[in-house]
Image (cartoon, rainbow, N blue to C red):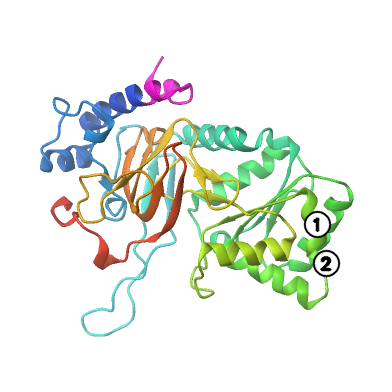
């Protein structure tokens, strides 16, 4: 079997570690940027013997470099929403947002990853009607989330599955119809849009809370500058009350990854078998913290076989002994440690 074929057959911790080391050796040879990064840290195939030895590429490199471990033609370029550049030196207008770019040479790996990932946590996609409220993603090109959700909508084979932008009346009518039909529903939405939907429903006295029995609310993204950020516990309480559901589900993914972790409630995430989380010390990027302590989130995503599978994110979180984790927030630029020497 090839490395690619092995990724989605992992069944235990030993399989994962063995394959992760194989992928490291492959990407050390095939990925020029990653090779140079490892060399700066004096890491190579001879002294990386276990997962904790593997260097994790800072996620910012996806903004400044072409991260590729394949010479095959690029099939898709996924881009992030981007962060705004500082003012120009003369105090002029803001520069264009700096976007991460994930160059994908085999989009079928991404498709296999999110299809199998959804199935791991929720079962057969055809058991659901998939509704998507993702305005900030729909309004730009290159979103990997839109690519995934669009495919899940089509794979559900349900005539009412689809995207919604600002047409809340139509979405509310659809939710009511599906509820009467006792249809299982996944409503995946960017956080601020879900809050907008609740407020709109309340303004027209629509009993949104009555729909909860067959409804999964999955929040993704964040406020995207549309609303003030609030802590997860407060946010989920508002969403639970507004939609009449006992828990709020969440999806943890990003442009730079081809896999997703899911939370089935209470903000605790779990990974599919080919993905794993480590938490690094916030003061020393090359060491790790104990279970239950806050650290920077490092992600091993073996589906990233053709880019880089070892990513040091800008998220803060805690990992627990059963390999679940929670996301607590993000580093601001002044908090990022250990990355200055990593710029090639």
Residue located 12% across and 38% down the image? 39
Look at the picture and state if 151 lies above or below 273.
below
Q: Residue furthest bottom?
A: 91
Numbered mark located on residue 97 in the image: none
The location of residue 101, given as percent across then percent down, is 37, 51
The location of residue 292, given as percent across then percent down, is 38, 48
Q: Determine whether label 1 and label 2 are within 8 Å by CB.
A: yes
- How far apart are labels 1 and 2 at the CA level? 8 Å
Residue located 35% across and 23% down the image? 19
For mark 2, what is the residue?
Answer: 207
Look at the picture and state if 186 lies above or below 74.
below
Look at the picture and state if 129 lies above or below 100.
above
Q: Is residue 9 magenta?
A: yes
Magenta region, residue range: 1-16
Question: Residue 64 falls in which quadrant of the image?
Answer: bottom left
Q: Dot 1 lies on which element?
A: helix
The location of residue 279, given as percent across then percent down, is 33, 46
The answer to whether residue 135 shows anywhere in this view is: no
Relative to 214, 278 lies left or right = left
Residue located 88% across and 47% down the image? 181
Q: Dot 2 lies on which element?
A: loop
Along the line of sight, the residue nearer the viewer: 54 or 60: 54
The location of residue 260, given as percent across then percent down, is 49, 43
Q: Residue furthest top?
A: 1
For mark 1, what is the residue?
Answer: 211
Q: Residues within 10 Å of mark 2 (few under 14, many from 20)?
A: some
Question: Residue 209 falls in which quadrant of the image?
Answer: bottom right
Look at the picture and state if 279 lies above or below 234.
above
Along the line of sight, the residue nearer the viewer: 53 or 160: 53
Placement of the N terminus among the 4 image quadrants: top left
């Amino acid at each position: 079997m090839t490395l690619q074929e092995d990724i989605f057959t992992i069944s235990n911790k030993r399989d994962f570690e063995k394959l992760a080391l194989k992928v490291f050796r492959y990407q050390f040879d095939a990925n020029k940027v990653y090779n140079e990064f490892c060399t700066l840290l004096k890491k190579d195939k001879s002294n990386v013997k276990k997962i904790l030895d593997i260097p994790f590429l800072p996620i910012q490199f996806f903004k400044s470099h072409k991260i590729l471990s394949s010479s095959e033609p690029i099939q898709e370029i996924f881009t992030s929403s981007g962060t705004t550049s500082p003012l120009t030196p003369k105090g002029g207008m803001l520069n264009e947002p700096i976007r991460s770019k994930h160059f994908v040479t085999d989009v079928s790996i991404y498709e296999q990853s999110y299809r199998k990932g959804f199935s791991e946590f929720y079962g057969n996609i055809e058991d659901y009607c998939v509704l998507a409220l993702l305005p900030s993603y729909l309004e730009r090109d290159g979103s990997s989330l839109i690519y995934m959700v669009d495919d899940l909508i089509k794979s559900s084979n349900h005539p009412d599955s689809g995207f919604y932008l600002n047409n809340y009346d139509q979405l509310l009518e659809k939710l009511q119809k599906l509820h009467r039909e006792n249809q299982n529903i996944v409503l995946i939405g960017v956080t601020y849009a879900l809050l907008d939907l609740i407020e709109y429903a309340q303004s027209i006295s629509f009993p949104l809370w009555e729909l909860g029995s067959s409804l999964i609310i999955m929040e993704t993204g964040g406020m995207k500058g549309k609303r003030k950020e609030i802590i997860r516990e407060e946010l989920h309480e508002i969403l639970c009350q507004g939609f009449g559901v006992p828990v709020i589900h969440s999806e943890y993914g990003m442009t730079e990854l081809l896999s997703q972790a899911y939370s089935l409630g209470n903000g605790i995430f779990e990974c599919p078998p080919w993905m794993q989380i480590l938490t690094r010390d916030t003061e020393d990027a090359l060491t790790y913290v104990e279970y239950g302590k806050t650290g920077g989130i490092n992600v091993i995503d073996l589906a990233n076989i053709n880019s880089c599978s070892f990513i040091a994110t800008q998220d803060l979180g805690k990992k627990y002994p059963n390999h679940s984790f929670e996301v607590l927030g993000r580093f601001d630029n002044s908090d990022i440690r250990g990355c200055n020497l990593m710029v090639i």
